[in-house]
Amino acid sequence: MKKGTIGVILIIIVVILCLGGYFWYRNWKNEISKIPPTAPSDLVASQITATQIKLTWKDNSNNEIGFILYRDGEILAELSENKKTYLDTGRKPATSYYYQIKAYNLAGESDVVSYPVTTLNPPIKIWIEKIGVHENGEEGELGREYDWLGRPAKGEEFISMLIQDEKTTVQKEFHYSLHKDEVTSVNELVFDSKEVGDHLRLFVTSFEDDGGNTEQLIYKAMGEVATSGFDLPISVLFKLAGVDISGIFADIFADLFASGDDFMGSYGQDWNSSNDWGVGKYVDIGCPRENGHVGLRLWFRVECPVYDYALGK
């Protein structure tokens, strides 16, 4: 047989095989398209950041047109066939979500598989912007209200600060000599967490040091709170430290000093996910003294990069 004839025969055979394969594949696709797809499995929702969830699953079918992904009962996305991952962005931190996925084709839908997940807590920063006083503890102090040149005297203000988020406890102390109604810039980052705990607590208290020995008790009390990690109520902790107080954040340290005008006021807050960990700008927070007048003044801000807040001036 001539080589040309053999070549023609081989070409005809190849064409027949290709056509046969094509019609077999089309018939197979027609047949399996009449059967709903097998459900995907092993759906996992992984926490990537405070605002991102990565979804992965196993594709168990060979006849799906695509997948339908749900979040909290609402369609999140319609995905193409053979898809096995999806990144859900723009979620709210520390929030629970419920994901579901199913495969589908013209014959119907598969069973649904589900997976619940909670996003991570967000990063939080706290900046102390300014510290000031209205009264500085020198008012009414005979011989101390003015200096020897007749100028209003400065008060020696000690400010103790505790910040705790169930993971980290930060203790800061500031010391400033301030005139009445004086404000000083601080601009210090005092707390920086990549993932804040479930509760964020801030406690600040201040006294004016006139040399009294009893004033050093404040450091002992603050140290006890820092060491404890806020496992007990603050009022209990201060009592354990040997400091008698009448209430939390109000008349705290009322019996601490020999002279009542040494206490310059206190401030305390406890934030969590329900109030966005206190994110915002706090301007001129007045901390009342025992006489009801404002002693200490605070300017600070709580920042979170995943929240878009207009924090004001």
Image (cartoon, rainbow, N blue to C red):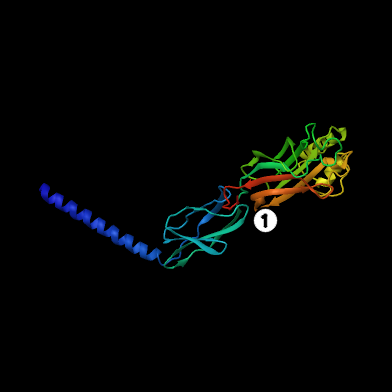
Q: Name the residue nearer the viewer: 212 or 270.
A: 212
Residue 240 x/y as whole percent: 86, 41
- Circle 1 is placed at which residue position? 274
Relative to 228, residue 69 above or below: below
**Which residue is found at the position 79% from the left and 33% from the top?**
147
Give the residue type at disc 1: Ser
Secondary element type, mark 1: helix
Residue 28 x/y as whole percent: 36, 62
Relative to 273, residue 241 above or below: above
Q: Answer whether residue 198 is visible to the viewer in this image.
A: no
**Which residue is found at the position 77% from the left and 42% from the top?**
205
Q: Answer whether residue 70 is visible to the viewer in this image.
A: yes
Residue 265 x/y as whole percent: 79, 45
Q: Name the residue nearer the viewer: 282 or 98.
A: 282
Relative to 226, residue 18 above or below: below
Is 170 displayed left or right of 144 in the figure? left
Residue 132 x/y as whole percent: 72, 42
